Image: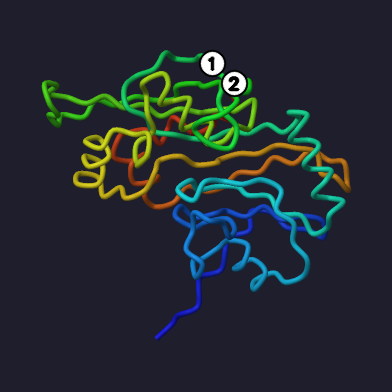
Amino acid sequence: MDFPDPPLTLVFEDGGLMAVDKPAGLAVHRSRMVARDGDYLMDRLRTQAGGPLFLVNRLDRATSGLVLVARSREVASALGEQLMSRSVDKTYLAVVRGWPDEAGEIDYPLSVGGMTGERKPALTRWRRLATVEVPIALGRYPQQRYALLALSPQTGRYRQLRRHLHHIHHPIIGDSTLGRGEHNRLFRQHFSCHRMLLHAWKLSFEHPVSGTRLWLEAPLDATWTGLLERFGWTSALAGDDATTH
């Protein structure tokens, strides 16, 4: 028996646009990387909200968090211009292997649209919010170190955050392509974590119709909240806007 999909959580909605909280594991739209009969956020949203919809930004299937969808081409175009001009503030949360510096930036060109080809400038800033040392042995290390980061991509290259963190040897936990398999297994086996720990947490931008500044935040799912509690990280987000400029 087929059961209806649960409704998507709308963080914001008005006559011009919607901000959707995309669950991890849900593809945004149809592509050659997703099965033809797969489940898609845009298909669900058309059923749920109706009317014409225009996707503004995209997230990897494994990433959760804020996706903007416009109700008209004009609003989509205006938001797209803000994204291109870098006037949209974007903050992601990630759990990574190791302890990076308290703050920094990764200025490392990335290929466009894939892992090979012409490289374009790419810049990511980070701030370390919390750390933990887990008393579980892996290889020659009796304890494992992990960190909670606030990430702010200044450019929008293909899988930029995943590739940049891999480049500085602090891969995101749960990244099945660029992460470390033994650490991903540790989180699955000991912390029941079966997803990539990357979340598009906050967006701030000017509403194309009203001109007011919007500050949007996508809630954390049960996996995230469970880890924050277990690692004693809950206070790291309390009262902290975690915006990295």
Total labels drawn: 2
Q: Residue at x 42, y 32 (%)?
A: 235
Give the vertical position of 35 relative to 122 (above or below). Answer: below
User: Which residue is the site of mark 2?
Assistant: 123
- In the rendering, at what x and y percent does residue 71 appear? 79, 59
Q: Is residue 205 left or right of residue 155?
A: right
Give the vertical position of 55 relative to 243 (above or below). Answer: below
Q: Is residue 81 left or right of residue 2?
A: right
Q: Nearer the viewer, mark 1 or mark 2?
A: 2
Q: Residue at x 79, y 49 (%)?
A: 76
* Placement of the N terminus among the 4 image quadrants: bottom left
Whether the residues at callouts 1 and 2 have beta carbons within 8 Å, the answer is yes
Closer to the chain start, of discs 1 and 2, is 1
Distance from Cα at disc 1 to Cα at disc 2: 7 Å
Q: Residue at x 36, y 21 (%)?
A: 169
- Give the amino acid type for the residue marked by disc 1 in the picture: Glu
Residue 43 image-quadrant placement: bottom right
- In the rendering, at what x and y percent does residue 228 appear? 36, 39
Q: Is residue 10 left or right of residue 169?
A: right
Name, please, the residue furthest toward the front.
117
Q: What is the number of the mark on residue 105?
A: 1
- In the rendering, at what x and y percent does residue 8 appear? 57, 63
Residue 2 image-quadrant placement: bottom left
Give the vertical position of 116 relative to 8 (above or below). Answer: above
- In the rendering, at what x and y percent does residue 176 appear? 34, 42
- Give the amino acid type for the residue marked by disc 2 in the picture: Leu
Give the vertical position of 45 relative to 23 (above or below). Answer: below
Q: Within 10 Å of the Cα at label 1, are there few (<14), some (14-19), or many (20+) other Cα atoms?
A: some
Choose between 138 and 131: the one closer to the eye. 138
Q: Is residue 198 left or right of residue 192?
A: right
* Placement of the C terminus among the 4 image quadrants: top right
Choose between 20 and 76: the one closer to the eye. 76
